[in-house]
Amino acid sequence: MGVLRAGLCPGLTQDTVQLLRSRGIKTVVDLVSADLEEVAQKCGLSYKALVALRRVLLAQFSAFPFNGADLYEELKTSTSILSTGIGSLDKLLDAGLYTGEVTEIVCLCVSANVAYSLQQNVVYIDSNGGLTASRLLQLLQARTPDEEEQAGALQRIQVVRAFDIFQMLDVLQDLRGAVSQQVSSASTVKVVVVDSVTAVVSPLLGGQQREGLALMMQLARELKTLARDVGVAVVVTNHMTRDRDSGKLKPALGRSWSFVPSTRILLDIEEGTGTSGGRRRAYLTKSPRLPTGFQEMVDIGTWGTPEQSPASQGDQM
Amino acid sequence: LGNEFSFSFFFCKLLARLEGRSSLKEIEPNLFADEDSSVHGDIIEFHGPEGTGKTEMFYHVTARCVLPKSEGGLEVEVLFIDTDYHFDLLRLVTILERRLSRGSEEAVRQCLARLFVVSCGTSSQLLLTLCSLETTVCSRPALCLLILDSLSAFYWTDRASGGESVSSQESTLRTCSRFLERLAVEYRLVVLAATQSLMQTAWQGPAGGPGEPEAHYRPYLCREWQRLVKLRMFFSKQDDLKTDTQFSLVSRHLKSNSLKKHVFVIGESGIEFR
C-alpha cells in the first residue's frame, strides 16, 4: 500500500514526489515515520506544507475508529446464528454457527462435515477431493425421504474445488467479488465450508520457509474478513496430528493457526466402535462464549443425536 | 515550533498531564495493586498461547472502564485496536449486561458509547492508525486506555514481505512501537497489548509453580518493543477437562524483576479473580 505518487491525495504534486524520493521517502509509511523538520530542511520543502500533507494522508489511509454503540446497532441486525441440524453440536456452539466468525472442526475423518446448514446456501470449497454428490445425497436421504426437498437442498450447495493455496485464495476473492456485485446465487450465501484447510496449508509448512507461514496467515485473514465483511459463517476443517514429544493428539497446522478460529470442536472416535458407527464424541476446545471442556455425543452418520435417529452405517471416507 | 498546529498539541499534552488520566491501579486493583501511578503512562504486555484468557481480560478491563461510576466503573473511554478480526462485541455486551444492576438496552448503549473500535488489516495500516490516533487522543480527554489485540498478528506476513534482513522486516513494528511509546508517555495512556505465543518452546509440561510458564518465554518481537514493556503478564490455562477450568497469570515487573501469580476463572459476566 501507499507508494507516493502525484495525485495520491490533494496537495501531492509530481515535484514534491520527486524531491521526497530523492531523499529516500518513497511510501506513505516513510513520510509518516520521518522527522518532518529534517525532511523540510533536506528537501527544501515547507515544514507547514509537509505537516498538512501528512495530516491528509493519515486521514485517507489510516483505519477509522467506530463507536461501540454504533457497531452494536449494526451487529444486532446483521448477525445470524445458523443451526447445524445436529442438536448436540448446536449446544456446543451455543445455538449454532455464528455469522462473522470462523469455526474449526477437527476430526480424523474430515468428510463428515458436509452435514451442516443445508437450509441455507452453502459454498463448499473442497480441497481434498473427498466430496461427491452421491455421498451428499445419501446424507440428505437419511434426513428426508422427500425427493423434492433433497433436490432443493442439493441446489443450495455450490461446490468449488481448490487444490492449492493460490487457487483457494482466488476462490475466496471471487466469492467476495460476486457478493459485492450482488450476483444472485452468491449474495444469499450464509455458510462457507473449507474442507480442508490442512490439505492446502500443510505442504507449505515445515523447514525454514517463512513464506509458508505468511501465506497461511494470509489465508487466515481472507477467511476472517470474508466472515466479517460479507456476514457469513465460515467453517473450516482441520486434521489431527500427534504431538512430537507428548504423543497426544492435537489439531494440525501449529500454534500460529490455533489463534485463528473463534471456536474449535474436536471430534474424537468413541472407543470400541471404530469408524463404522458414525458416533463421535465432540469436545469444545475453544470458544469465545462458552467455557471449554463441554462434551456431547454426536452421530454424524445420520445427522442427529444417537437416541433420536436410527443407527445407520454412515461410511466414512 | 512556532506554528499554531504544534502549539495546540503542546497545550493538549499539558492538559493531559495536569488533569490526570486514570492510573493502572484504578483500572484493575486486583492486578495492579502495587503499581504506583507514574507520571508517564504504562505499557503492559499480555502474552500467552491461544485460549488462555487474554482477550477475556481485555473485555474485563474494558467493562471496568466504560461502566458508569454508579455501577463501580470508571466512566472513561477505551480505544480497542483489533488486528485480526477477533473482537467480539456481542461477548462484551453480555459481560456488560451481567455487570449492570439494571441491564437495560439504554444502559448498555451508554457504556458502549465510551468504546471505540478500530480494525487494522496490515502492519502499515496499524502504523498509520497509531500515528493518526494522536489527534483522536488529544480531542478526547476521557480516553485513558488503549488496547491492542494483538501486536503479533502481522508477524509472519512482515517477515516474509519485509526484505532480506531481519532488521528491515521489523521496521514497521519498530515505528509502531515508537508511536505507542509516544501515546503512552506524552498522553499518559495506559497501553495493553497482547502478543501470541507463536514460537515452539522446548518445554511441554503443565503449568507448575509461579516461575514455570514465563521461564520459557522466547521474545521474538523487535527490541524496540521489548524495551518499552513495563509489565509482562504470562497467561496459561490448567488443562483439565473434568473440573472448572482455572486460568492463571504470572506478572513480571521488568525493572524490579518481581513475579506475582494471580488465578482467575471466566464466567458469564467475565473474569473473576480467585
Image (cartoon, coloured by chain):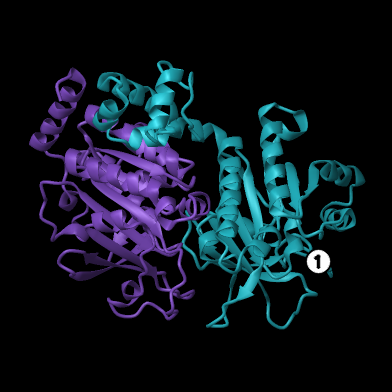
Position of B23 compared to A95: left or right?
left
Of residues B78 and A283, the one nearer the viewer is: B78
**Chain that the image shows in cyan:** A
Residue marked by disc 1: A310
Q: What is the x, y in percent for residue B12?
A: 16, 29
How would you rate the neighbour count of disc 1 (Cα within 10 Å): few for under 14, some for 14-19, many for 20 or more?
few
Residue type, numbered disc 1: Pro
Residue drawn at point x = 18 percent, y = 39 percent:
B186
Q: In the picture shown, does residue A207 fall above or below A60?
A: below
Position of A44 compared to B13: left or right?
right
Examine the rendering and report whether any part of residue A106 can be seen: yes
**Chain that the image shows in purple:** B
Examine the rendering and report whether any part of residue B114 can be seen: no
Quarter occupied by residue A253: bottom right
Of residues B109 and B53, the one nearer the viewer is: B53
Residue drawn at point x = 30 percent, y = 54 percent:
B225
Quarter occupied by residue A176: top right
Of residues B56 and B241, the one nearer the viewer is: B56
Position of B223 compared to A97: left or right?
left
- Number of numbered labels in the structure image: 1
From the image, which quarter does the N terminus of chain B lie in?
A: top left
Position of A285 compared to B41: left or right?
right
Of residues A249 and A12, the one nearer the viewer is: A12
Q: In the displayed image of the protein, which residue is found farthest to the left?
A: B18
Q: In the picture shown, does residue B132 fall above or below B44?
A: above
Q: In the picture shown, does residue B242 fall above or below A13?
A: below
Q: What is the x, y in percent for residue A94?
A: 55, 53
Q: In the picture shown, does residue A266 fall above or below A68?
A: below
Q: What is the x, y in percent for residue A115?
A: 75, 55
Quarter occupied by residue A313: bottom right
Residue drawn at point x = 55 percent, y = 56 percent:
A263
Q: What is the x, y in percent for residue A166?
A: 70, 49
